[in-house]
Image: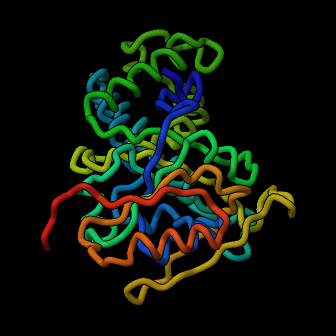
């Protein structure tokens, strides 16, 4: 199994794997213009987005530390640094104004849950070749992708093993810590050394941890880390930020272009879309776009 890297043990797909994106007719049309509108992570439907790894790591510390005073200090310092890392600079500050933007895909085709959540069974499920999709995005250094982890015990184990391998077994980071027991005697200097490293790792895991109640989504996500202005970002690397309106709320997003639509293999029409011209309309649309994309209907026998 492949992972994001040796430090971030989030599984990633490989060449030949497929991804599915559930969307509306308008969403499909926009994507077929070679563009995804990618929402900023603070505006996704899950209120706990990008917080779970922080919470789980605090549980890991609680399970190993006896000295509750040192535990409290360590948890607060790490949480505070994570909040600092994830807070974009305000107008007039030198800190960069940036955001993390998420495209959600599903690993399941013709999913009842995903039809219900994204299109009331009337939309479309777009099937992509994973590697071609990844390659078709305009080249960016600031992109991570991987499977979302929902299981609490798996999340706990990943962060526990991360700390053991990257901190306790790596003396160059914090020489005074070689076992979990050493945390009960950790010094202020050693806490500072941990705060320089651990929050950065947790920030990456936060991108791919969600609560178990969302496990039915079987999500695979792409995360684009975009700088808009300020900080050390070079002008050519800055990304424009846009806003759309939803339920009288301003939602920030970025536009991510595709170099090619060869990654799109087929489209499934939602089970409630019973119009006799639904298939023909898509076939005409793809012919007009000069795209070779097969069109099928969902196999779910829904009446209403």
**Residue 52, image x, y percentages:** 36, 45
From the viewer's side, name the closer residue of 119 and 175: 119
Seen as rendered, the residue at the extreme bottom is 248
Name the residue located 51 percent from the left edge and 48 percent from the top edge: 82
Name the residue located 47 percent from the left edge and 76 percent from the top edge: 281
**Residue 265, image x, y percentages:** 53, 51
Name the residue located 50 percent from the left edge and 39 percent from the top edge: 146
From the viewer's side, name the closer residue of 141 and 185: 141
Task: Say above or below: 35 vs 170.
Answer: below
**From the viewer's perspective, is 285 left or right of 235?**
left
**From the viewer's perspective, is 151 left or right of 284?**
left
The answer to whether one can see residue 160 in this image is yes
**Residue 158 position by quadrant:** top left
Task: Say above or below: 194 vs 64.
Answer: below
From the viewer's side, name the closer residue of 270 and 288: 288
**Residue 87 position by quadrant:** bottom right
The answer to whether one can see residue 89 in this image is no
**Residue 145, image x, y percentages:** 55, 42
**From the viewer's perspective, is 262 left or right of 147?**
right
**Residue 232, image x, y percentages:** 81, 55
Name the residue located 67 percent from the left edge and 65 percent from the top edge: 290
**Residue 69 position by quadrant:** top left
The quadrant in which the C terminus is found is bottom left
Seen as rendered, the residue at the extreme left is 303
Task: Say above or below: 261 vs 61.
Answer: below
Report the label total. Answer: 0
How is the structure coloured here?
rainbow
């Amino acid at each position: 199994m492949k992972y994001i890297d040796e430090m971030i043990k989030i599984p990633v797909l490989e060449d030949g794997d497929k991804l599915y994106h559930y969307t509306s007719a308008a969403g499909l049309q926009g994507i077929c213009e070679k563009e995804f509108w990618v929402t900023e992570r603070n505006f996704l439907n899950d209120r706990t987005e990008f917080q779970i790894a922080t919470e789980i790591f605090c549980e890991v510390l609680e399970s190993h530390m006896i000295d509750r005073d040192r535990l409290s200090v360590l948890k607060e310092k790490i949480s505070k640094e994570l909040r600092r890392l994830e807070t974009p600079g305000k107008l007039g500050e030198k800190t960069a104004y940036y955001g993390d933007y998420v495209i959600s895909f599903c690993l399941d085709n013709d999913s009842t849950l995903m039809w219900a959540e994204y299109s009331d069974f009337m939309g479309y499920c777009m099937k992509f070749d994973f590697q071609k999709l990844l390659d078709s995005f305009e080249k960016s250094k600031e992109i991570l992708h991987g499977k979302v982890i929902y299981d609490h015990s798996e999340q706990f184990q990943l962060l526990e093993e991360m700390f053991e391998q990257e901190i306790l077994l790596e003396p160059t980071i914090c020489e005074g810590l070689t076992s979990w027991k050493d945390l009960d005697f950790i010094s202020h200097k050693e806490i500072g050394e941990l705060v320089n490293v651990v929050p950065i790792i947790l920030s990456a895991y936060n991108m791919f941890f969600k609560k178990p109640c969302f496990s039915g989504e079987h999500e695979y996500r792409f995360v684009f880390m975009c700088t808009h202005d300020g900080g050390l970002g070079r002008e050519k690397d800055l990304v424009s930020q846009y806003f759309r309106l939803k339920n009288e709320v301003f939602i920030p997003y970025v536009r991510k272009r595709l170099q090619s639509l060869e990654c799109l293999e087929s489209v499934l029409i939602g089970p409630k879309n019973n119009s006799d011209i639904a298939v023909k309309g898509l076939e005409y649309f793809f012919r007009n776009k000069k795209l070779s994309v097969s069109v099928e209907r969902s196999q779910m026998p829904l009446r209403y």
